[in-house]
Each structure stands twice: as structure tokens, then as C-alpha cells.
Amino acid sequence: MTQDATFEDGRERPLNLGAQDTDDLRVISSLVQDAIFPITEMQWQARQHRFAILLNRFRWEDAARDRHAPERVQSLLVIDNVVAVSSQGIDRGENDLILSVLAIEFTAGEESAGDLVLTLAGDGALRLQIEALDITLKDVTRPYVAPSGKTPDHPE
């Protein structure tokens, strides 16, 4: 039996969460809200059916935020079972472009397949056609003080 992920799972430890259903995906979506990344840090490995992004995500799960400066951490968001990737409102040729994640949503299709949409700030979006929901979010660095020194609006 598996247990759903919660914000408390993060505590002061690096996150290493998986999502294989929509309830788990909601947790991961909340944790990556306001994450930023250069367009050059996303990669689709077509042969491995994998899409990955190295994110600089805000540490929403940090219960000690009121005692120290807001923090970010680099995290790897890996989506498996990807059969196609498309984008809207993004100039993929602009290598200096910085993107910001607003939400991740799944729309089910036939059987376990469907579309995973990463909604980005500025009317951009990434759509991944997937055979089954299988996502991992893993922190890969130590937290660091958010360069802006500010906390983004709290996720809904």
C-alpha cells in the first residue's frame, strides 16, 4: 500500500516524491508553482520516453520560512512515458528565455493515457502526451536564499 505525498513530507529534508495519480500530481503541482527555469534546462529524451526540467523551485514546504529568508532549491522534474511534446506561446529558439511554472494538470484520455499540461506564466504552455502518469520531483541541491528575497504569492 502506498501513501499519498503531503507538504509535511518535505520538512527540512530534500524532496524525492513521485506521482502516479491525480492526487499525487496536485501535491507536485503545488510544490513546483512559481518554479523558474531557463528554456535550455528542459529536455525531451524521445527514445527513453522521458521529459525532464531542472527547476529552481520555491520551497513551499519549508515550515521555518518565517524564521529565515525565503529559499529556493534546484529540483529535477522528470516525466516518464512521454510519447509527444508540444508547446504554445514559447519561442524555443530564444536561449535566454526564463520560464515560470504556474501549474501542472492531467487530462485523462483512453485507459491510463492522456495529456499533461504545464501552464507557464505569460500564456505559455507545454503539453506532453503520456501513456501513463509517472512523475518524479527530486531536490538535487541544498536550499539557497531566493535571489529576490521575496516569497511568491502562496499556491492555491
Image (cartoon, rainbow, N blue to C red):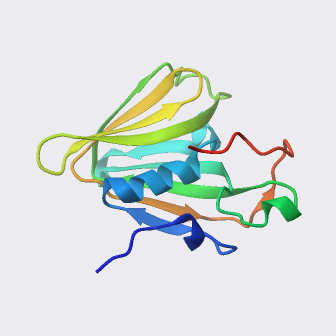
Q: Residue at (12%, 43%) from the top-left corner?
A: 110
Question: Which image quadrant for residue 108?
Answer: top left
- When the figure is inspected, residue 48 is found, relative to residue 33, above or below; the finding is below
Question: Which image quadrant for residue 155?
Answer: top right
Question: Which image quadrant for residue 18?
Answer: bottom left
Q: Residue furthest bottom?
A: 1
Quarter of the picture holding the C terminus: top right
Percent of width and height locating residue 112: 17, 51
Q: Is residue 110 left or right of residue 43?
A: left
Q: Residue at (30%, 50%) from the top-left corner?
A: 49
Q: Residue furthest left?
A: 111
Percent of width and height locating residue 136: 44, 61
- When the figure is inspected, residue 36 is found, relative to residue 97, above or below; the finding is below
Q: Is residue 145 left or right of residue 23?
A: right
| Front-most of residues 145 and 83 | 145
Percent of width and height locating residue 13: 65, 75
- When the figure is inspected, residue 33 is found, relative to residue 76, above or below; the finding is above
Quarter of the picture holding the N terminus: bottom left
- When the figure is inspected, residue 22 is found, relative to residue 140, above or below; the finding is above
**Badge count:** 0
Percent of width and height locating residue 134: 33, 58
Q: Residue at (68%, 57%) from the top-left corner?
A: 59
| Front-most of residues 117 and 44 | 117
